[in-house]
Each structure stands twice: as structure tokens, then as C-alpha cells.
Amino acid sequence: MAIWDYANPTRFLRLVEIILPWLIAACAAAFAVGLYKSFFMAPEDYQQGDTVRIMFIHVPAAWLAMMCYSIMAISSLGTLVWKHPLADVSAKAAAPIGAALTFTCLVTGALWGKPMWGTYWVWDARLTSVLVLFIMYLGLMALWRTMEDPIKAGKAAAILTLVGALNLPIIKFSVDWWNTLHQPASVIRLDGPTIHPDMLVPLLVMALAFTLLFFVLHLMAMRNEVLRRRVRAMRMRAASVAAPATARATAQPAE
Amino acid sequence: MDPFDLGPHAGFIVASYIVTFGTMAALIVWVLVDRARQLAALKELEEQGIARASARRDKS
Amino acid sequence: MDRGGRRVFAGLTFSVSAGTALIVTGPNGVGKSSLLRTLAGLVAPAEGDLNLEGASQPDMAVHEHAHYFGHQDALKPALTALENLTFWQSFSAPAPSPGFKSAVMKPVQALEFLGIGHTARLPAAYLSAGQRRRLSLARLLITPRPLWLMDEPTSALDTASEARLLDLMNNHLSGGGIIIAATHSPLNLSTIVRLHLETAPEPMAPLSQERDA
Amino acid sequence: MTGWVGSLFARELRIAVRVGGSGMIGVLFFLAVVSVIPFGVGPDLNLLARIGPAFLWIGALLATLLGLDRLFQADRDDGALDLLLMAGRPLELVVLVKCLAHWMATGLPLVVAAPVLAIFLNLSPTAIGAVTLTLLVGTPALTLIGAIGASLTVTLRRGGLLMAVLVIPLTIPILIFGVSAADAAVTDPVPFLTPFLILCALTLISAVVGPIASAMALRFSSD
């Protein structure tokens, strides 16, 4: 069965019903294991002490924030190129989740930064890029909210998402450049050369847990969006009971 | 190793976990509330006797 | 075709041959304007296609053979009547087709012909509603395009201007042009096919007709 | 072939000049923004000289964005956008020509005003020259990127604020390299030419991406 068959919203909803319980169970299990490992198994970092435990949520959130934008960019291609009916539903449902993940990433980053660098915020290249990503998520959400017609809003947002996807590497490159010019002296670089396996395992488990959580939320938000569109269509039909959806044409010669 | 002794920066660690799980909980609540709202609206419309648009569109 | 998530009409088929006017009538909100905008290529149809047979440049889309005369005048108040008109003449690509003889006018001639020659040097902001309408109409005369899509062409025109408009439209038809007009008022044109859109009860009845006059 | 490009350009420029001098208002806004800066950071001339290029750039960015929301909306309001779509001309080129005309009417006055405002901020002659040159190269890119936002929000009644929110993140690279180049001309951690050439490249990229995305959005907006 091709992915195309799930274009039909009803079939999509049925599929979600089947997948969702399994996904939720897997997600809960992954979180249980991940949290246990990150608190009880992972050693303290010799340099950063216990604050390294923030990494187990900060880094997965950052990864997923970027993955979420990639999913939105692919969905946007789906909207514009293949005109897949679920593509803009997927993109729209992903945006708030992406924004929340970026927000988490920023806040945990700040809370990690304070004890480590002595400041909540530095205009580090990574932090700045993530901030820009956050603004773009919020802008896209605003665009969706402002436009009444979901089809039109979907197309407009798709164009913006793709332009953003073209732009993000340029922004990243620019911010890196800018950052090397204005490098603050006291920053400790995050990327140590190696990461101890005792820490890598909990990190990967947590990343898996967050990924599963993302997909659970994404599928549920998509399901809501499909329902919302159904409600909208039905309300429009309710408003035009007198003039239903079709017109009849009769042509006749004059004179 | 005592897992509940988080060292001198315990406040930051706890705060970041609270923020993370608070945000995720907010997302989950939003998704569930949104679903309940749409289902209620759907039910209300169906009680009014409006047929589902997709029932017709599926055929074409 | 769909409009705002709602299917406006479906299963509509018709053809219009050279020298014929298709008059689209029907109650408010049935989709007359939507039909014209679809034909003008401004709204993409959900399914189906539009064809222009015997076009001189087959690579051009249907709407590039058409003039659209809608509710809005597309005039810039800051520009003079002549500037407005000259711009559209040089900007719109002409689309002559073999069976279509058109009397292409110069902008000044078109203004004179429509009785607003004296306004040529005035900014369009000073024109009255009827004059603006006629200035907008002059656009159809200066670039030859065989298909005229007109949405309520007679609105804001007095009796004399309406008669002149009908002359123009008849002229266009006799030159082998095609007119598709949505209107409430009867138009006294030489060769007419009527297309009446009305709301259909469920289930939908895609009743359609083809007719060449 | 080139006739219609010329007449579109002439029309846009004529409208821009005749309708209340929108370029003039942009320059006034630029002046207002730049003149509040000393009140914010204090009248320390050395500090102003150091941050002056940055504020000139930010002022130019804001002034450009403010003028952009009418770029397509005016044409949509009076129905001209429909006719532009139907005219049988490549829409990408139409957008590009409109942007160029818009830049001539609103962006170029900003560039011309920049040296005068730079004197208020105590910039050295070299810095004045560098800022003006980077603005000359960079402001077209701001207009072209802004055109994407303008066409996305063309159907919205009050789209100006939303447009600014959508466009500002996309303009960050322009800002970075514009200011870097201007700074590099005075203090030199890097040669002037490196960031300046990257700025030129960014302008060229936006001259391609801007019209394509914007034309696509305009086609969808007419639905």
C-alpha cells in the first residue's frame, strides 16, 4: 500500500487509531528508561558536574526542533509540488510542536549556561540560530492564524517554509561568520571532543523518547486538524443549505 | 552515587526539567482539548442533520 | 471548481464558437463571477480544463487570449487617463488569432470613441464613476484579444454609454471575437447563447449543454 | 519584448513619485530612527562612531520594511493585480521590475540620506563611504526579500506587521554582512572586500529567490 492511499483523510484517521496506542506505549517506555538512565546511571561530568543532566533534555530538544523544520519543509514540498491533501495538515500541525521544542531548547540552554558560563545568554552562533528558528516558527503560526481559508494559508505557509529552508543554512553561515568576528573570550565550547559512553546511551535513549513524543503529538495534532477542517466544511454547508454545493446549467438558444 | 543529590546547581537542573515537562504537558493538554472541541463541534453539527462533507467527496 | 473550500459548481461543460456571446445569468452567489475568474485563469479549477481551439500561439494559455473586465477598474488615480491606457497597451501581450479581425485603436482614439477624449490629460482621480468605467473599457479596444470576459459590464453606465458598449460588443462579435458576460440586465447582442446557473438540489445534477450558434 | 518592461518600470516609478512621495516618508522615518539613538545610548561620540554603522543599517531595514506592504496590495485593491497576472508576461520578471522601481523610489533615497545621517553619528569619512556603499548594494536585497512577505500577506487587510515579522529573520544575513563590511572598512579584523563580496552574492541570490517565491505566492493569492 503506497503512502498515497493515506491521502484520504478518513483512511488516515483509521490508521492513526491503530498506530497511536503503540506509539504512546513506546514513548512512555522510552521516557522511563531514559530518565532512569540519565539520573541513576550517567556519571557526573568531571567539568560540568551534575548540570550535565540538562544535556539529556536540551540536546534532544535541539535535534528535534531541527527535524521538525525538515518535516515541515518536506510537507511544504508535498503541498506545492505533489498537492498532497495531508501535506499542509502535517506542516500546520508540526509548527506549534516545533515552536515548543525550540522554546524548551532555548530555556534549558539558558539554565545550563548560567552555572557553566555565568550567564543565561550569550550571542553564540548556535543559540542565535535557534532563536531565529523560534521566531520563524512563531511567524509561520501567525500566518496560519491570520488567513481564514486553510488551503490558501497552507500554500502561503509552504512558500514561506521553503524560503526559510533555503535561508536557514545561509543564516547559520552568517551567524557563524559574525560570531567569529565577535567571539566573546570567556565562552567554554560545548562540543567536547569525546562523549563518554555512559552519557551517550542515556542521551540516545532520551533522543528516541523525544522523537516518539514528537510523532505522537504530530499525529494527534494532524488528526485534530483533519477534524477541524471537517467541522469547517460542515459549517459552510450549514450556512449555505439554501444554496448547496452544485449549480445546474441549462443552455438555450436565444431568438 | 545519590541520585537526589544534584550538587550545587540543583535548582537549574530541576528548573530545566520542570520547564521541559511543563511545555510538553502543555502541548499534550492543547492537543487533547483541541480534539475534544472539534469532536463536540462535529457532534453538534451532526445533530443538526448536516451530512459529513467527506461522505460525498469520497465518491468523486 | 472550489472556492474557499466549498465546491461552487461541478460538471459544467460548454463551448462557445467565434462570433458568439455567452450570457451567464443566475441568482446572487451561484458562482457567475467565479466562473469568469476561472476562465480568466485567476482561479485554478479543481478538475477539468479549458481549451481555445485555433489559437495562433498554442503555447499561450487561454487567459492570455482574454481580456478580463471585472468589477474593479484597475486604474491608478495618480496617472492620467492616457497614461493608464498606454501602460496597459504596452504591458498586455497582444494575442491575435486567425479567425479574428479586430479594429485596434490607438489609446487617444479609444478615448475619443468612448466619449472621454477630453479627459486624456487628467489624472484618473478626477474622473466620475461612469468615466472611469469607460476608461477601463477602453483597455479592451487597444490590445487585440479575441476573448472578452465581462463581469456586469453595464454597471455604472448610463443609457447612452450602455448603447455604445453594446455596439462595441456587437462589433467585437462580428469581427469573430467571443464574449462571455455575467449579467443581470438583458444585453441586446446579435448572437447569444445563454447559460443559466441555478442552485441544484442534492444529488447534484451536472446538466450541461453544448451549443454552437 | 523590452517595451513592456520599460513601461511597467515607468508606471511604477511615476505612481511612487506622485503618490505623496513615499520615498520622502521613508527618509523621514530613517531620520527619526537615527535621531532617537543618541537618546537611547547617550551622547558619547566615540560610542556612537563605533555603533553608528549598525544603527544606520537597522534604520534602513525598518524603513524598507515599512514601505513594502503596499507593493502588491495597492494593485490588488484596484483589480490591477488580476490584469498583471493575465497579461501574458512572466510574473517573476514583473515582480523583479516592480521591486527595482520600488527600490528606486524608496531605497535609493535612503542610501542618499545615509551619509548625512552618518555625520550625526560621528562616523569617519571612510566609515561613511563604506556604510553608503554597503547600503547601496544591500538595500535591493531587503526589498527583494521583503517582496516575498508582501506577496504572502497581500490578501490580508492589515498585513504590514505580520509581513515584518515574517521577513526580519530572513534579512539577518544581509544585516550581518552589511554591518561587517562597514565595520571592516574602519577597524580591520578582516579585509573589507570579503564581507562586501558576500553581501553582493546575497543580493544576487535574493534577486533570484525573491521574485520566484513572490510570483508563486501571487498566483495563489488570486484564488
Image (cartoon, rainbow, N blue to C red):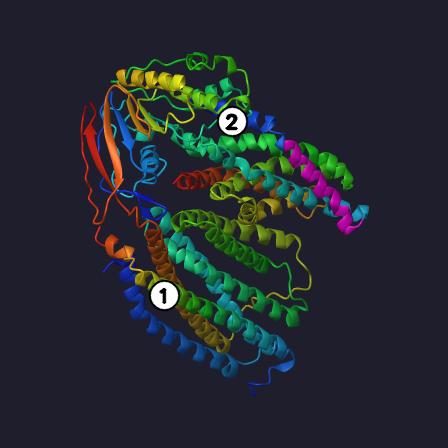
Chain of the residue under the numbered disc 2 shown in the image: C
Mark 2 residue crowding within 10 angstroms, few (<14) / some (14–19) / many (20+): some
Residue D73 at x, y percent in the picture? 50, 37
Q: Name the main secondary structure of what is drawn in magenta.
A: helix
Residue matched to label 1: B39
Q: Quadrant of the N terminus of chain A?
A: bottom left
Q: Secondary structure at mark 2?
A: loop
> Does the segment drawn in magenta span residue D26?
yes
Specify the quadrant of the image occupied by residue D52.
Answer: top right
Residue B1 at x, y percent in the picture? 56, 87
Specify the quadrant of the image occupied by residue D29.
Answer: top right
The CA span between labels 1 and 2 is 49 Å
Q: Nearer the viewer, residue B31 or D92?
A: B31
Boundaries of the magenta span: D23-42
Farthest residue toward the right? Answer: D44
Q: Residue at x 50, y 19 (%)?
A: C81
Q: Is residue C142 visible?
A: no
Q: Nearer the viewer, mark 1 or mark 2?
A: 1
Q: Nearer the viewer, residue A177 or C171?
A: C171
Q: Is residue A245 above or below residue B54?
A: above
